[in-house]
Image (spheres, grey):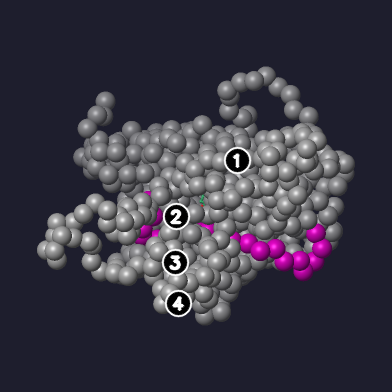
Amino acid sequence: NHHGTHVNGTGGPLDERFTEGETSETLTNRQGHPVRDNQNIRTVGNRGPATLENYDFIEKISHFDRERIPERVVHARGTGAHGYFETYGKLGDEPVEKYTRAKIFSGAGKQTPAFVRFSTVTFGKDSPETARDPRGFAVKFYTEDGNWDLVGNNLKVFFIRDAMKFPDLIHAFKPDPVTNRQDTERIFDFLSQTPESLHMITFLFSPWGIPANYRQMQGSGVNTYKWVNKEGTGYLVKYHWEPMQGIKNLTQEDAEKIQAKNFSHATQDLYEAIEEGNYPEWELCIQIMDDHEHPELDFDPLDDTKIWPEDQFPFLKVGKLVLNKNPENFFAEVEQVAFGTGVLVDGLDFSDDKMLQGRTFSYSDTQRYRVGSNYQQLPINAPKKHVANNLRDGQMAYHVDSGPKQNPHVNYEPSVLGGLKEANKRPHPYQPNVEGNLQKAKIDRTNDYKQAGERYRLLEEWERNDLIQNLIAALKPAHQRIQTTMVKHFLKCDEDYGMQVANGLGIGVRSENGSYHLEVNEEISPSNGSLPKHG
Ligand code: HEM
C-alpha cells in the first residue's frame, strides 16, 4: 500500500509523485518534504543552542503537543470493532414491514455495515475495565438511508428518568472534586434521594454490574423509541441485544483478581477473539407496544427505570450483529467515533421519553466540542451514501459536502441557479398529536420499588449474596442518615433485601403492623461518614 494506512480506505493523500531518491517508504512531513534527519534538531554546532526555524522539529513536536482531544465526559474508556447487521425479516410471525418502514429491517438476509463501541461510564480513558459500572453498547449502522445510531447500555434500565438529573448523577459517581477518588458515600447520598434508581442499583451492585467481558454481555437501548410503518402508524419499541456467546458476570472478588494483573482485559478479549476469527454475535430483539399511555400498566412505558415484562411483551428477534474486523487505528475510529440518539432514519422515531429527549441534545453538542464542529465528515462518522448540503466551513472542514452537479456558488437553498433541492416528501409522515400544559413535573406512575424487589427475588443466590456484600461495603463508610434511608428503600423493595443490608450495617429492624422501625445501635454502627460537613 503506497498511501500508508487510510482508515476505512478513504482520506489521506492519493497522489503518488515522488521527488528524487524517494520511495513510498520515505518519511515526509505533512507538507510533503522528505525528512532527511529525524534524529537531531538543528543547532549551532553539535552541542547547541537550537534555532527557531527548526521547521521539521517544530512541526513534529507541536503536533505531538496536540495529540489528545478531550476524552468523553462519560464512557471515556472503551473499545470498538466493525461488523455488519443482518436482517431476519420477521417480527414474530409477521413481516417486520408491518411495523416499520425503516429499510434496514426489511426483507431477510440483508446486511448493513456497522461499527460498535463498548465502554465503561465513570472513569477516564485508560481506567480498569473491571469497574463496577454500566457498560456502554453503542452501534452505528451505515444504512442505505444514512446512519442510524443505537446508543445503548448493557443493563436494561437506568438510574433516573429525567435528563435534568444526569449531570448530578454523573458528578456523584465521578471522583470527589477534592480527593479525586470515587466515594460511595457521595454516590448513595445522591441515590438515597433518587428512589427511582433502586432497580438499577439492584443490578449494578450484583455481579450484573461487572460483565466478564464485552462479548458475553447483553445490550439494550434502555430508552423507549418508536417504529413507524408505511401508513404512518407509530409503535413504542424497546431494543435488546442478546449475546450468542452467553452471558457471564463477575463477583467483586473475581474482578479484583483480574484487575490485579490486567486492566484492559475486556479490550484484549474482544480484539483477540476477532483476530482469531471467533466473531462475536448478538441477536437484536424488539419489544413492541401500541403507541399510547397504557393506563392498564402499573408503570409508564416511557419510564427508563422500568423493564417491560417479557411475558406480556415478548422479545421478538429481528436480526443479528456480527463483529468481524478490528479497527486499523484506535484513535481514528474508536476515539473519534460519535454516536447520538438523534441519529435515526425514516421508520424509526423518538418517543416522548424525557431522558431520550435530553440525551438527543447532549450527544451532538458534546461531539462538536470533543471532536470538532465537522466531526460528521470524519470517515468513521460519515454515512456510506450520498451526502450533499449547505453546511460550510468551521474548524477542520475536510471537504465541501456539495453534490456532484451543485453550482459551487450556491451554498443556500432554495435557488434556481443550480443549488441542492429538498428530497421528496414522504406520503405518510408520522404526526402524533400532543397536548398538555407546559410544566416541570414528574410522571404519575413512578412505582419505584416493585420491579427492584422482583429483580432481587429473581437473582440467583450467589448473585444476591454478592449484591448484599457489595451494598454493605459501599454503605459502611456513609453517613448514618444515608444508610437508614437506603435501608428503608430496600425494605420497600423486598423485606429480606432490607433486612440483609440492615443486618450488615448493624441497623436493627422491628416490624410492627406492617411498618418498620429502624433501631440504630450507635456502638456497632459504622463511622459517621467521611465528609466534613455533616449536619
Ligand atoms: C456517551 C450524555 C444517558 C449510553 C455519552 C456522552 C454524553 C452522554 C455527553 C459522551 C458522548 C461523546 O463524547 O461522544 C447522556 C445524557 C444522558 C445519558 C445527557 C441522560 C439524560 C444514557 C443512557 C444510556 C447512555 C440512558 C444507555 C442507554 C451512552 C453510551 C455512550 C454515551 C453507550 C458512549 C458512546 C460511545 O461509545 O461513544 N452520553 N447520556 N447514555 N452514553 Fe449517554
Q: Position of residue 423 (x, y in %)?
A: 80, 43
Left or right of 213 on screen, residue 36: left
Q: Position of residue 288 (x, y in %)?
A: 74, 49
C-alpha gap between disc 4 and disc 1: 37 Å
Q: What amino acid type is highlighted by mark number 3?
A: Thr
C-alpha gap between disc 2 and disc 4: 43 Å
Residue with the mark numbered 1: 392
Residue at the (65%, 48%) spot, across then down: 401
Residue with the mark numbered 4: 23
Is residue 118 in the magenta section? Answer: yes
Disc number at residue 267? 3
Q: What amino acid type is highlighted by mark number 4?
A: Thr
**Residue stretch in magenta:** 106-129
Q: Quadrant of the C terminus?
A: top left
Q: Using the image as rendered, state which of residue 510 and residue 44 is in the foreground.
A: 44
Instruction: Give the answer, above or below, for where 482 lies relative to 270.
Output: above
Q: What amino acid type is highlighted by mark number 2?
A: Thr
- Dot 3 or dot 4: first in sequence order is 4
Residue with the mark numbered 2: 120
